[in-house]
Amino acid sequence: MTRHETLNLRKAKIAGGVATDRRHDSAHKHVTGEAVYIDDMAEPAGTLHAYLGLSEVAHGAIRSIDLTAVESAPGVVAVLTAKDVPGINDISPAGLHDEPILAEGDVQFLGQPVFAVIAQTREAARRACRLAKVEYEEKPALIDIAEVEPQGARLVTKPLMLARGTAAEAIRAAPRRIKGRMRVGGQDHFYLEGQIAFALPGEDADVTVHSSTQHPSEVQHMVAHALGVPSHAVTIEVRRMGGAFGGKETQANLFAAIAAIAAKRTGRPVKIRPDRDDDMTATGKRHDFLIDYEVGFDEEGNILGVDLTYAARCGFSADLSGPVTDRALFHCDNAYFYPAVRAVSAPLYTNTVSNTAFRGFGGPQGMLGAERIIDEVAFALGKDPLEIRKRNFYGNGNRNVTPYHQEVEDNVVHRVVSEVEKSAGYAARRRAIAAFNAKSEIVKRGIALTPVKFGISFTATHFNQAGALVHVYTDGSVHLNHGGTEMGQGLYVKVAQVVAEEFQIDIGEVKITATTTGKVPNTSATAASSGSDLNGMAAQNGARQIKNRLIDFAAERYGVPQEQIVFLPGRVRVGNQEIPFPDLVRQAYMARVQLSAAGFYKTPKIHWDRDSGRGRPFYYFAYGAACAEVSVDTLTGEYMVERVDILHETGKSLNPAIDLGQIEGGFIQGMGWLTTEELVWDGKGRLTTHAPSTYKIPLASDRPKVFNVTLADWAENTEPTIHRSKAVGEPPFMLAMSVLHALSDAVASVAGHKHCPRLDAPATPERVLMAVERLRAEA
Amino acid sequence: MTAIRNEIRFLLNGRKVALADVRPGETLLDFLRLDRRLTGTKEGCAEGDCGACTVLVGRLSGGRLVYESVNACIRFLASLDGCHVVTVEHLKRADGSLHPVQQALVDFHGSQCGFCTPGFVMSLYALWMREPQPSTQAIEKALQGNLCRCTGYEPIVRAARAVSSYGEAGADPLAVERAAVVAEIEAMKDGARVEIGKGHERLVIPAGVDDLAAVLEAEPDATIVAGATDVGLWVTKFMRDIAPAVFIGGLEELRAVSEEDSVLTIGAGVSYSEALPHLAVRIPALGPLIDRVGGEQVRNMGTIGGNIANGSPIGDMPPPLIALGARLTLRKGKERRTIPLEDFFIAYGRQDRRPGEFVEAVHVPLPDAGTHFAAWKVSKRRDEDITAVLGAFNLALNADGKVTGVRVAYGGMAATPKRAAAVEAELIGKTWTAGTVERAMGAYERDFTPISDTRASAAYRMLTAKNLLKRFFLETSGAGGPLMVSRDEAA
């Protein structure tokens, strides 16, 4: 039987078009273990393994490096130090030349790579690393940002200020004023697949690196710089990552550079994969923040003026700390209108690992400042925080200008929040909780409903572009490639759905291929929730180019006007006849029609002037709301999330099943950040929570006991995004603020809801218990 | 003279494996991935905490074949002698169709990045064979040792509930082929001592307990490896040399639980999972506590004897066992001595175990009817976390409500598991009232000066330790509302 005979020419609908539930394209390979991650790839004969030697002090000058024992250890082939970097010893993504591949002269954090060992086996390389004798002249190390005054402190990058109106005056003139400080912890990505790179040397200066990266183009540039070769000599490929969450946006650069240098030096394939402990010690995390706030408000709970300082522990280099702290300020309002506002960032230098991108990218920390302010106002006035939230929401058409002077044009926060309020039965449950707490001596319950408004677009405008490559083969099957990377979020399947929809062919006819710099160049990181928005549009553009050529061809061949050519499921109607898609493709090929296209997209409308703090950095906003109820043991601080109700809007979802997974998963990850995930550094600057034994991400048994998640079926993007969908990667993460505030509500009950618990994050059982004790003392 | 064999033998999926070249510290995971190129089993953490490396190990227990989930990353290859190792590659049917567990996960969108997925498949496979219609709590318990960073677990739990609608556990190949596998394993067991390697780089699997005693007398410095949930990390994290190593996990004689005269005797090789049904029935308060020790994989591997022998100040079993008045039998050669468990812990990292001696069994007196016993663990995360504070209380009251006997022991409060002597002294002979308890809470500073570390501050430890006594009092006397949060169905 030929392929053509299997086609159903009367089919009403293709399999796997847009706006349908579609399983992850690799799901069947995930469950069988057949999905290939980089460490699973067959190693060519002669493959070597690299391992990193890390700094043992947080800050110091390297006095001497004695590697003789390392070099003579069994299996060792080569040892690399900074002087062995053939090109530029720098992988600063900010272009500030502040991040060496291997330390030179000084080390600036405990865990900084100092040398690399190349050996026959990974174990041999790892063992040999321990034989190094490195002497340091220790210098004073700055570990904790609570020790520094933001004013006059050393910064890793230029701070940002956003201002609208005169905040100081508004606060001074306000009937009520509160000032406070909030501490927000960082977060390790804990991608299940750790960092890894596998470099294969080619002829001339060429090298191909399989890198677990969200940003193949940047890895390409970094490897090229490190080798001192043009970008054309370097190809980066990634089929899939075992999780990333921002942790492989810039942090993969180091490993790819080491593997490539070692491969070119030895002429053999080289793989590098750190142990989990070293991965967590040597790679960046979510920034922890100190938020100083002052709010002026009236007796009704209207916020009149806000002043905020967001100080972040950035680590020893800039990395992405500039845009991360910027995004914190962009979300210092969450969904609330500030009549007058001043917000400044302080990206602080510290002798810790350089913090980096993590789902939300500063936005979550920014929003927590806003939500703390809401709590402060509510407790000061003895009102329900939800009332204060609703009172201060952005308006529609008025009260709609953000601190960065962008108008909020697509506001649906009122509807989202009121629907959750109803579906969760908020008012009745608040009463029931009050009754429960009155009778329950030890266990106290709490509830909170918090909104999310998250800005979509890279705030660096030029990143908002994407490319795709679409080939249609003569049998009608389609090869799809684009600049986006697959880290589990389902980007590949979504973009394939877009292409299937465009050609009206089953998704099985579309082959999803590994992201590689050789096919689509100059790509942006798959980050900022932008994957489907950008790559979906680029792929659609590529498919449309081919489609238009097919239309032109068919119009001419069959002598029908173009508007009478319609792509139907599996076939094309040309005038009065229907031609199977593969037949038309074949005919076009015979007529020498180009069946390959490079698609391109750039986001319209956006612009941003950082110096003036004005512009439209975001194409649109994504909205959601969550209501959480918790129970807290006031003897130990232990707690349980009893129930969570979420309504999230993803526009007209490309794939509701995938989007639901992003919402559920993002929420739980956010809950981990705000509850049990605690990063602890000791006085020497050593991260002591460097493995899952000590760093506790949520388990299945930490899920809310009742977890109702709904996609807003009425939603549609007001902007012409890909099939009117919305980005969904990051926004749901911040729905977890509801858990922190529900804990805060439970704690507040021990003092009659008259004192703001000022519960910092992560709200570990210890922090919760200490807040209970503090409030009891205040009451 | 004991017969000696110079290879280990086991079944790997459908094949027999005999290995004469095994290093003492070689892990099952490295063997699978590097030697056999079975790359479906992943390394996520190399310390038995994430579950990406979960495989099933089938072993004979009292003649019955039991399949348990284990962490291949910290499971030593040598410990698999006479076992059946099942990896994710074994699940797909010959016709290419997916196993019920796999199909359920696909259909419920249970994977995103997919890296943790093979581990979840294996944990759910073990659960499904044991409990085809699991409750939500049973699913959560089976998944305590599996981390997923993408899905938030909800779709995985949904899939787990649905597995039985995709197939029948009784018709699963591992169920159907049980007799054949038992026969193959029986055929491997020749009663010989296994010795592999020469000189220092040597490993021994004794033929039995008497043989173990002989081996240790000859080699008192050998590393004793039982469940390897601690020793595994010495190798994977600290790259310590554990040779010569003596593997005792397969010794059936050490895996017995017996009861005589109201004393439960637990062999040193009894895993948490094996001990659980006995302890949970005879000492109900220990059931929920054991459920919070490690994850399922760790409970399947880790032993109660090992938890005692390694002397950790934060081991979860010593405090309750001390509170119960447990005694420990140590053996050297043919000689045995039995000591109060609390005397075994001398100082941090120092136990009363003499060269050539090994822990043989622990004897746990069952609490009398009418006494009150409780043991509670406090940790940052509820499940699969290391203890911050663990308090255990054993109280006898007379008819007048006077304290006639009390034993209070804590973990996480000192350099060893420790009894709260001053607190006990405040309680003994007093009437069990809120006031008495309040006064006893003032005695904690005389017993303990806890430290601050990654898991908790000294202040939190002290406060929580005292509050656990308060909880114990409320539990015996009643209070308004629940005494602690629970994972039971939402109210």
Image: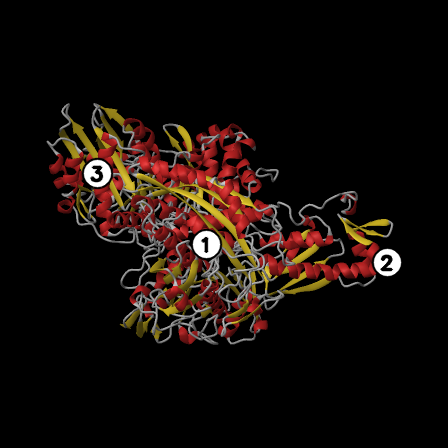
Residue B338 visible in rendering:
no
Residue type of the residue flagged with mark 2: Pro
Other-residue count near label 1 (Cα within 10 Å), few / some / many at <14 / 14–19 / ≥20: many
Chain where mark 1 sits: A
Q: Which mark is residue B469?
A: 3
Separation of marks 2 and 1 at Cα, in angstroms: 53 Å
Other-residue count near label 2 (Cα within 10 Å), few / some / many at <14 / 14–19 / ≥20: some
- Check the image and report above or below for A501 versus B473: below
Residue B482 picture location, percent across and down? 32, 34
Quadrant in which the N terminus of chain A is drawn: top right
Instruction: Give yes or no for contact between labels 1 and 3 (Cβ–Cβ under 8 Å).
Output: no
Q: Secondary structure at mark 1?
A: loop
Residue A49 picture location, percent across and down? 45, 62
Separation of marks 2 and 3 at Cα, in angstroms: 86 Å
Residue at the image position 27 percent from the left and 64 percent from the top? A684
Residue type of the residue flagged with mark 3: Leu
Left or right, A602 with respect to A526, comes to right
Residue type of the residue flagged with mark 1: Tyr
Mark 2 lies on residue: A561
Q: Secondary structure at mark 3?
A: helix
Residue nearest the observer in this picture, B216 or A453:
A453
Question: Could you say which quadrant of the image residue A124 lies in?
Answer: bottom left
Residue at the image position 76 percent from the left and 45 percent from the top? A7
Residue at the image position 87 percent from the left and 57 percent from the top? A560
Mark nearer the viewer, 2 or 1 = 2
Residue A626 picture location, percent across and down? 48, 47
Chain where mark 2 sits: A
